[in-house]
Image (cartoon, rainbow, N blue to C red):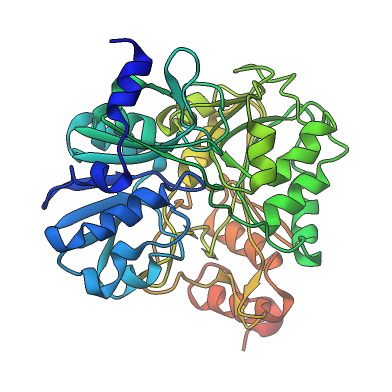
C-alpha cells in the first residue's frame, strides 16, 4: 500500500486511538518536550472503562493526571526518572520509582522483561518517503516503539524534524493523531548566579581544548558553557543538551572538529529546552540523535578521547559516595546517565569525570559534603567510580586515594563553616588523625 494511503487510513482522533487501550495493560509515554499531552488527556478520558493500567515513563513535562488520587486503581505510574509532576505520588505510595541506569532501560523492552502493550509518542509530519522523525526526543522511545504491541503517534507540525537514528515509518505506526500545537517547553532558569560561576570556573579549568562534553541542564551547566567561550574545538556526546549550547555552536567553539567518534556531529538522545532550541534543531545535520542504549553505553562513550562528563549530586559523603537520586528515603529524580558517563569518561583517553555541586543546600544551612549520606539515601555513583568533585571552593581529586586522603580533600572544598564539624567526625571515625594541638 502506498504510504500516503496508509497514513490516511490510520488517521484517528485522540479518543478513537486511545480506545485501543485495555485494562491491565502497560503504556509507555515519551518524555521531555515530546510528551504527547493530547494522547495522555484522551487516556484520562477513557479512565472510567479501565482498571490496573501501568503508565511507564521517564521525565515527562506538563501534567501527569494519571498520578492523581482519584485514579488509584485505574492507573499506576512507574517512574524510571522522576520529575516534579510525579514526585508527590511516589512519596505518597501511589506511584513507583525504579532505580536503573539509563543505558539499560531499553534492554528491559528488548528482553521481554518489561513488555509494552501501547506506546504513546509524538513525531514530526512525514517526509516524502513516509518517515516520521521523533524530533526532540529519541531516548528509549524508538526502541519502545519497535518492541511495543501497538504504537500511537501524535503527528504535530510544530515538532522539528531532526536527524540521526530517529525515524519511524508510517507502516510502523498503528494509529496517527494529527495536532498543531506548541511543544511543551522547559523554561531556562534565571541566569546562572555567582555561585554557579564560581563552580563553573573550577570545572572549566579541567576541560582541555578538543574535549567532548556531556552535561545536563540548570545553573551549573549553563555557567560551565559560558566559562568555555575561549576554548577550542569542543564536541558533544551527551544524553541531552539544552538551549545553553546554542551560543557556543554559533561561535564555533563547539564544532566537533577533534572528535574521533562521530567527528563534526553532536551526538545526543534528547533535548530539554525551549522553542529557541527547537528551531535551532530543525533539519540541522550537526545534531545526530540516537537511542540512549547507544549514546549512554559506557563502551561507546569511552571511544571519545578527552571525554569530559559533568554531573551533579545532592550529597557527597567523606568517602566519596555520591547520592543524586533521593533525599534520604524520598526518591527525587533518578539514576539517569550519571554512572554511564562517569564510567565512560574514566575509560576515555584523557577523560575527565566530574561531579559538580554547590557546597551547601537550604540557604547555606546544610552541607552537601556530608559526614555520611542521609539514612536511606541512594548511592548513584560509588566511591570507587568518583574522580573529581567540584564545589565553589575548589576541586577534590579522589581517584586512587585512601579514605584519609579523600576526607582531607573533601573537607577542603566544603563550606568553611562546616569544615570543623566534618573534621571532628573524620577524627572520631578514624578517617583522620587529630592534629597534635587537639590531642588532650
298 left or right of 45 in image: right
Please, is residue 76 above or below residue 180 in the view? below
Please, is residue 235 above or below residue 17 in the view? above
Q: Residue at x 81, y 41 (%)?
A: 228
State the residue lying farthest toward the bottom.
Answer: 440
83 left or right of 210 in image: left
Q: Residue at x 54, y 30 (%)?
A: 347
Q: Position of residue 305 (x, y in %)?
A: 64, 24
Which quadrant does the N terminus fall into? top left
Q: Residue at x 59, y 63 (%)?
A: 407
276 left or right of 380 in image: right
| Near-viewer residue (146 or 339) | 146
- Which quarter of the figure has residue 438? bottom right
| Near-viewer residue (230 or 123) | 123
- Which quarter of the figure has residue 362? bottom right
State the residue lying farthest toward the right.
Answer: 230
Which quadrant does the C terminus fall into? bottom right
Can see residue 278?
A: yes
Q: Position of residue 226 (x, y in %)?
A: 81, 47
Please, is residue 167 above or below residue 322 in the view? above
Q: Position of residue 416 (x, y in %)?
A: 73, 76
Callout count:
0
Q: Position of residue 376 (x, y in %)?
A: 35, 70
Can see residue 77?
A: no
Amino acid at each position: 500500500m502506498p504510504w500516503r494511503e496508509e497514513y490516511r487510513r490510520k488517521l484517528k482522533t485522540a479518543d478513537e486511538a486511545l480506545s485501543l487501550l485495555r485494562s491491565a495493560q502497560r503504556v509507555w509515554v515519551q518524555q521531555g518536550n515530546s510528551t504527547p499531552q493530547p494522547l495522555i488527556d484522551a487516556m484520562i478520558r477513557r479512565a472510567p472503562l479501565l482498571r490496573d493500567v501501568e503508565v511507564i515513563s521517564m521525565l515527562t513535562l506538563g501534567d501527569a493526571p494519571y498520578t492523581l488520587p482519584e485514579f488509584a486503581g485505574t492507573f499506576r505510574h512507574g517512574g524510571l526518572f522522576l520529575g516534579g509532576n510525579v514526585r508527590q505520588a511516589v512519596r505518597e505510595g501511589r506511584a513507583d520509582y525504579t532505580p536503573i541506569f539509563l543505558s539499560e532501560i531499553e534492554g528491559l523492552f528488548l528482553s521481554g522483561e518489561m513488555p509494552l502493550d501501547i506506546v504513546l509518542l509524538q513525531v514530526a509530519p512525514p517526509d516524502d518517503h513516509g518517515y516520521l522523525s521523533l524530533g526532540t526526543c529519541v531516548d528509549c522511545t524508538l526502541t519502545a516503539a519497535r518492541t511495543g504491541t501497538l504504537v500511537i503517534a501524535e503527528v504535530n507540525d510544530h515538532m522539528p524534524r531532526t536527524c540521526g537514528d530517529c525515524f519511524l515509518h508510517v507502516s510502523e505506526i498503528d494509529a496517527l493523531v494529527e495536532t498543531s500545537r506548541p511543544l511543551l517547553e522547559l523554561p531556562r532558569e534565571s541566569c546562572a548566579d555567582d555561585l554557579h560561576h564560581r563552580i563553573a570556573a573550577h570545572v572549566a579549568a579541567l576541560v582541555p581544548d578538543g574535549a567532548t562534553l556531556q552535561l545536563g541542564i540548570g545553573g551549573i551547566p549553563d555557567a560551565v558553557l559560558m566559562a568555555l567561550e575561549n576554548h577550542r574545538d569542543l564536541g558533544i556526546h551527551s544524553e541531552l543538551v539544552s538551549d545553553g549550547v546554542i551560543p557556543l555552536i554559533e561561535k564555533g567553539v563547539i564544532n566537533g572538529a577533534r572528535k574521533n567518534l562521530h567527528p563534526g556531529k553532536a551526538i545526543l538522545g534528547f533535548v530539554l529546552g525551549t522553542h529557541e532550541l527547537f528551531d535551532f534543531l530543525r533539519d540541522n545535520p550537526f545534531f545526530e540523535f540516537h537511542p540512549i542504549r547507544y549514546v549512554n553505553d559506557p563502551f561507546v562513550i569511552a571511544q571519545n578521547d578527552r571525554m569530559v562528563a559533568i554531573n551533579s549530586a545532592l550529597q557527597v559523603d567523606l568517602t566519596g559516595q555520591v547520592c543524586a537520586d533521593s533525599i534520604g528515603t524520598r526518591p527525587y529524580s533518578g539514576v539517569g546517565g550519571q554512572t554511564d558517563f562517569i564510567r565512560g569518561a574514566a575509560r576515555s583517553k584523557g577523560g575527565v569525570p566530574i561531579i559538580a555541586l554547590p557546597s551547601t543546600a537550604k540557604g547555606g544551612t546544610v552541607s552537601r559534603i556530608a559526614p555520611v549520606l542521609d539514612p536511606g539515601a541512594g548511592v548513584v555513583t560509588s566511591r570507587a567510580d568518583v574522580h573529581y568533585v567540584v564545589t565553589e571552593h575548589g576541586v577534590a581529586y579522589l581517584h586512587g586515594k585512601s579514605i584519609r586522603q579523600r576526607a582531607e580533600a573533601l573537607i577542603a572544598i566544603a563550606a568553611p563553616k562546616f569544615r570543623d564539624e566534618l573534621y571532628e567526625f573524620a577524627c572520631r571515625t578514624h578517617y583522620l588523625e587529630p592534629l597534635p594541638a587537639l590531642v588532650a
